[in-house]
Amino acid sequence: MAPIFLQYTIIVCLAAPFFIPFFKKYAKHIPFIQIIAILFLLLHFYNNRQLLPIRFVFGGWQVFNGVEILFSEESLVFIAATYIVFLSVIIYSSKKNHNWKFYFLINLLLSDLTCLFLANDLFNIYVTLELMSLISYLLISIDLKNRQIWSSLKYMILSAVSFNIYLVATAMIYHQFGTLNISMLAQNNIHSPLPFLLLITALLIKSGIFFYSMWLPSAHSDSESTISAILSAVIVNAGVFHVLRINQAINSPLISQYIIYAGISSAMFGAYLSVKQKDIKLILAFSTMSQMGFILEGWNNYGVEFAFSHSIFKALLFLAAGYYQQLYGTRNIETAKRKVPPSLFIAIWTGYLSISGLPFFLGSFYKHEIIVYSKDLIPIGLIFATIGSVISVGKFAFSVTPSKKIQGFFEKNLALFLLSIICIVFGTINSLNHLDMEHLLEPEIFFGAGIFILFLLSRKIKIYYPYKLFKLSNVITIYTIIIGLILTMTFFEF
């Protein structure tokens, strides 16, 4: 019964956006209804996790040549994060005069992401990623500002490189194994990891990883804040979800090491560059690169749960940044402290304490476990990245003070309240289950070190944005070097 019900649910989700052009008056209500219905369905499956995983093939085809859907616990977590973020975005922007086309794109993107987190073969992953990217290009440039259009074009060009690498890798895998189904690939002996390394590289370009997703800072900072929240909290999950799923299925030591090194590089460089910014959205954009590194490092140890945590607190921070910008017309935090409404102050600090990994806030336990169970010198790099997050986002948190005046932006306050409650409630539940000195004291030491450095050296930190590094021609050169390193790794391994 569950597979049939899930099959019809997917069909309804895909059909929902196409009702919007015919019922333009209810454009914002259609995605809202879909979100509420799916969240209740996810809650049912969460309470009946023994039913998972659910597998079925559309149309009665065989697994070998059909479209297989895999609804696992990991899918449940990523889809839940997606729907919560979209719910907060729709609430946040409900008073803005978006036309029906905006809600059509939002709803289509939501339905596409639902299918993406259920896809279990490489071709349908490609189709859903391609559609996700096309919609993202349009949403990034939806206000038709010059910087937005250029950021969208840059994302489009680098995504085209990613998809070409992906298709080459897919063709090599199909030639070698005769199937694109991930579960069936897991049953084969991997003679050469080259196609899978190329496949992982293509997905990393979509995953917000430093040296790979060089489109991210401009796309996240130039977009409208609601779109930035979706990009940073959800879109980057699309690539990393399948990086984790494919890596677990293939179980190749070389591929795992490749992912770990990409993760630690992203965690450290993202944290370093976030500290060097004064623009709130650039701070958060580079912070996304850092946090995605943590997710890769925890690929077999709470990485999925930390991905959920990151989606919630990063959406909270981006929406709070948009609220701040609307109040003061600037994203520059190198100014005197500004008074903000109590709701915004609480949201900023909830997001800050969550991303810093403090106990009783969302993500604290998962981040601690990822650091502790990493091998070799990786924990040192992750501690560096954690302190970097405390410093960089701390510049935003300490630049505001609460005012006694309560602003009348009810819909924005409601969206921030929803995300803040999730951060506090889920974080408290996790911390109450792990009340020991290790889980309580270590995060506070890292937080204290970050605060000490922030107040001691903040004025001495030189503001710097590496424009040359993110220049399009230089990014293509970086991709060429990465592919060269992959070929070298494969040659020496085999």
Image (cartoon, rainbow, N blue to C red):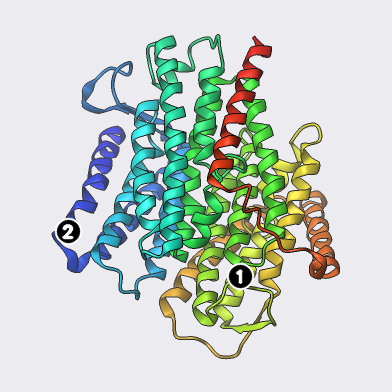
**On residue 282, which mark appears?**
none
Residue 253 % position (x, y):
65, 20
Look at the numbered disc 2 and give the secondary structure of its residue. loop
The residue tagged 1 is 348
Q: Residues within 10 Å of mark 2 (few under 14, many from 20)?
A: some
Residue 121 appears in view: no
Residue 387 % position (x, y):
77, 55
Decide which of 419, 162 is in the foreground and name it: 162
**Amino acid type, callout 2:** Pro
Q: Quadrant of the C terminus?
A: top right
Decide which of 264, 369 is in the foreground and name it: 264
Decide which of 385, 446 is in the foreground and name it: 385
**On residue 21, which mark appears?**
2
Between the C-alphas of marks 2 and 1, the distance is: 37 Å
Q: Residue furthest bottom?
A: 405
Residue 393 appears in view: yes
Q: Is residue 54 above or below residue 321?
A: above
Decide which of 444, 282 is in the foreground and name it: 282
Q: Residue furthest left?
A: 22
Dot 2 or dot 1, earlier in sequence: 2
**Residue 390: quarter of image:** bottom right
Q: Residues within 10 Å of mark 1 (few under 14, many from 20)?
A: many
Q: Residue at x 33, y 42 (%)?
A: 131
Q: Residue at x 49, y 27 (%)?
A: 199
